[in-house]
Amino acid sequence: MTVCGPMKQYQVVGRKAPTEAFPNPEAYRMIIFAPNVVIARSKFWYFMQQFRKMKKTTGEILDVNEIVEKNQNQIKNYGIWLRYDSRSGTHNMYREYRDLNLCGAITQLYDEMAGRHRTRPRSIQIIRTSTIATADVKRSNTLQFVGKDLKFPLPHRTDSAKRGNKALSDQTFTVGRPTTCFR
Amino acid sequence: MVFTRFVEVGRVCMINYGKDKGKLATIVDIVDGNKCLIDGCNTGVTRQIITFRRIALTDLTCEIGRGARAATIKAAWKKGEVAEAWAKSSWAKKLAAKAARGNTSDFDRFKIMVARKQKSKIVAAKVKSM
């Protein structure tokens, strides 16, 4: 699937198409992370085919709803369990991210997996997600930022105007070197 | 190199880029080494995650707890008199002077020129007499 921009969380409910023999088949609900509804529906069938004898032609999606995070004002620690394909095999992984909402953490996950492991979004399956209490945080990188009285300076500011950020200098050529240290 | 301006909960920062450019906000929480959560309830900045590249730290801080909500931040700003302290700072004064200069009309600039000439005349006369 093409992943561009922020991921959203969808609840997709589907079932096998009702027949005369089975007029009321069991419905299944999945939580899918996708950039939009179309890909969410597609991913639903991708997983349902793996888990049950059900596919898009023999089934129907009953409902797709976006799940919006209730509390988007506090930063939380998210633990994400995933399964991904590398070039030589498939592996399980557990990663932690700090973000305002789960979708933000998932977006970070996909970007980081692409950067660190060259994993394409099609190769990633999210198994489980959860908010992690500060005491249960495992990764040292996350632990760095959970403590009380956290403070650090910004010692070496090398801001370029790439990716929508403000540049250190508004000129391409200057007489003297720009200063990078702002106390 | 001694650092005096830290990224910390309660640090007042100025936004350098984006639609809220030039506004102050408070750092409410730190996400990671690149981003923090800011809230500028006093200055009209919505609560958001922003990268450090888009903010400049000021000397001012206010007393808030991690993840404080808008009401708490507003009260802390008032108690710490942040807005007044900012207006008194030379940084704010320079920004205000630049903005004022940008808003001058041609007639204002003429008046400024005349005033400068008058001032330099007085100064030159005084220097000559010394």
Image: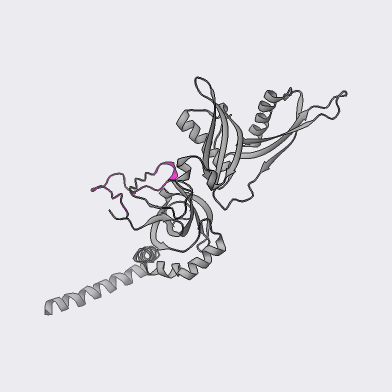
Residue at position x 47%, y 59% in the image:
B25
Asked if the magenta segment contains residue A157, the reply would be no
Quarter assignment of residue A8: top right
> Does any portion of residue B63 appear in the rendered image?
yes
Magenta stretch: residue A161 in it?
A: yes
Residue A24, percent from left and from top:
84, 30
Q: Quadrant of the C terminus of chain B?
A: bottom left
Residue B19 can be seen, yes or no: no
Q: Is residue A52 above or below residue A98?
A: above
Q: State whether the magenta stretch is mostly helix, strand or loop.
A: loop
Residue under the image location 45 percent in, 41 percent down:
A141
Outermost residue, front direction?
A: A135
Left or right, A70 with reference to B18: right
B104 or B89: nearer the viewer = B89
User: How far across and down, in percent of the image, does residue A65 sit?
Assistant: 70, 40
* Residue A95 horizontal side relative to residue B104, left or right: right
From the top left corner, tell me how far across and down residue A42 is, in percent.
66, 29
Instruction: Tally the marks.
Output: 0
Give the extent of the magenta segment.
Answer: A159-183
Residue B85 placement (x, y as % from top left)? 40, 69
Q: Identify the residue at horizontal 31%, vertical 49% (top origin).
A: A180
Q: In the visual, does A118 lie left or right of A51?
A: left
In the image, residue A165 above or below residue A28: below
Indicate left or right for B116 with A29 as reference: left
